[in-house]
């Protein structure tokens, strides 16, 4: 079976982890600072504040900019639920806007129609590694006086018109084990705002700037030195691995072109897609439904993934939550029925890619 994800560590990670183990310093320290320095280059921001996971990054970002009870945050229903959970954890209210049909990111026009006087922040999601329309959202945020928080958990190194994601507003990244850049668990918040960065540093460390000198009620959101050691090694490989992902995506797009009922991923002009996932759409003209395609591909030794089979508001814990506003989202609902992610990770061989394309053609012929 060719797996949809595969985790391989660079040998440098072993050396750096061993260096940390021998140092005796396992909690947040110089290796975390080194990782933050390296990631600032990726995000193009003045500050990068490491935390213990991607969900924490979202929660901490919202807290740092002052989002709290009764504030509204507009985001996508077609995302991993950490996006929604972070808003609810702050006691804020979730307002959903629909997505664009081609790249699965938030539709700026739908977002504008969703904003109310209680809206305090926009939270676009850079889904599958394709950036949302940050030029439009940046203008909208400035015009309406709203904060801009980027869920960039799947988009390390992506950019719009050459500007990295995570630099348009407050950026939130995940380093979960299957991400393009991973530490096992871990997260990062990026910003050019000195005050926001300072507040983030306090929040992650129990509100302390100095030991036992508390300036605010904080949390333990610290990243470990071991995670940071893996991150330092991984960030050095991000560019070359992203090039490989993009090359794999191009090859798959060419081999899958012209299959009836199959829409291949797009890359909007000026948007640099980093292909965390190569997500196709099994549309209404296909010979089989999406779920049948997934089953038949597995029978041919090709694993695939469905991200995501249901929208956030299709789960009772969100649908029945009074802090979540439910409106029909026809494009997001259609995407949840039709999307399937094929293999694109950097460890695929040419023969792997050919096997994937052949299996897809056989299934949909």
Image (cartoon, rainbow, N blue to C red):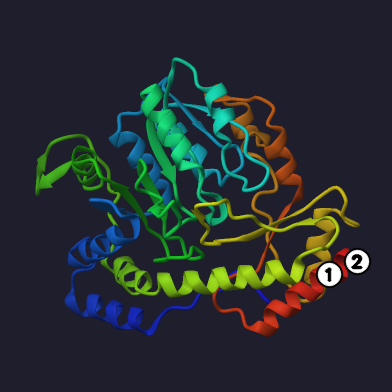
The N terminus is located in which quarter? bottom right
Taking the image as shown, residue 343 lies to the left or right of residue 145, namely right
Up the image or down, 335 lies above or below 4; here it is: above
Up the image or down, 185 lies above or below 352; here it is: above
The C terminus is located in which quarter? bottom right
Q: Position of residue 333 (x, y in %)?
A: 72, 38
Q: Is residue 142 visible?
A: yes
Q: Residue at x 64, y 53 (%)?
A: 307
Query: Where is mark 2, residue-wise?
Result: 365
Q: Residue at x 23, y 51 (%)?
A: 46
Q: Is residue 4 visible?
A: no
- On residue 204, which mark appears? none
Is 298 or 355 nearer to us in this picture?
A: 355
Q: Position of residue 226 (x, y in %)?
A: 30, 69
Q: Residue at x 59, y 55 (%)?
A: 267
Quarter of the image where one finds residue 319: top right
Crowd band around label 2 with a 10 angstrom C-alpha radius: few (<14), some (14–19), many (20+): few
Taking the image as shown, residue 250 lies to the left or right of residue 284, namely left
Crowd band around label 1 with a 10 angstrom C-alpha radius: few (<14), some (14–19), many (20+): some
Point out the residue furthest to the top here.
117
* Residues tagged 2 and 1 counted as in contact (Cβ below 8 A): yes
Quarter of the image where one finds residue 248: bottom right
Q: Position of residue 310 (x, y in %)?
A: 69, 43
Taking the image as shown, residue 248 lies to the left or right of residue 214, namely right
Q: Position of residue 150 (x, y in %)?
A: 42, 43
State how far apart marks 2 and 1 are (Cα). Answer: 6 Å
* Mark 2 element type: loop
Query: Where is mark 1, residue-wise?
Result: 361
Is 23 or 60 nearer to us in this picture?
A: 60
Up the image or down, 317 lies above or below 40; here it is: above
* Mark 1 element type: helix
């Amino acid at each position: 079976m060719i797996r949809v994800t595969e985790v391989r560590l660079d040998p440098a990670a072993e050396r750096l982890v061993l260096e940390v183990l021998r140092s005796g310093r396992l909690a947040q320290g110089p290796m975390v600072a080194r990782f933050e320095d390296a990631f600032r280059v990726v995000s193009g921001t003045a500050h990068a504040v490491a935390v213990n996971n991607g969900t924490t990054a979202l929660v901490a970002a919202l807290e740092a900019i002052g989002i709290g009870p009764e504030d509204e945050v507009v985001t996508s229903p077609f995302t991993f639920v950490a996006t929604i959970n972070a808003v609810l954890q702050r006691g804020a209210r979730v307002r959903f806007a629909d997505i664009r049909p081609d790249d699965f990111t938030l539709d700026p026009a739908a977002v504008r129609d969703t904003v109310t006087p209680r809206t305090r922040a926009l939270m676009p999601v850079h889904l599958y590694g394709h950036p949302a329309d940050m030029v439009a959202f940046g203008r909208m945020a400035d015009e309406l006086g709203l904060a801009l928080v980027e869920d960039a958990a799947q988009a390390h190194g992506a950019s719009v018109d050459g500007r990295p994601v995570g630099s348009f507003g407050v950026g939130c990244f995940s380093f979960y084990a299957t991400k393009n850049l991973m530490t096992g668990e871990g997260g990062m918040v990026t910003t050019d705002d000195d005050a926001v960065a300072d507040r983030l540093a306090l929040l992650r460390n129990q509100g302390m700037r100095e030991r036992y000198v508390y300036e605010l009620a904080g949390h333990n959101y610290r990243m470990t030195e071991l995670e940071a050691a893996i991150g330092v090694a991984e960030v050095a490989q991000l560019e070359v691995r992203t090039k490989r992902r993009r090359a794999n995506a191009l090859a798959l797009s060419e081999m899958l072109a012209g299959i009836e009922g199959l829409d291949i991923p797009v890359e909007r002009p000026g948007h640099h897609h980093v292909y965390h996932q190569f997500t196709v759409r099994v549309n209404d003209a296909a010979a089989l439904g999406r779920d049948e395609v997934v089953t038949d591909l597995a029978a041919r030794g090709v694993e695939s993934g469905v991200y995501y089979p249901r929208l956030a508001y299709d789960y009772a814990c969100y649908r029945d939550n009074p802090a979540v506003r439910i409106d029909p989202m026809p494009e997001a609902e259609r995407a949840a029925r039709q999307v399937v992610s094929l293999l694109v990770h950097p460890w695929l061989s040419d023969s792997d890619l050919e096997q994937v394309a052949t299996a897809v053609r056989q299934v949909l012929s």
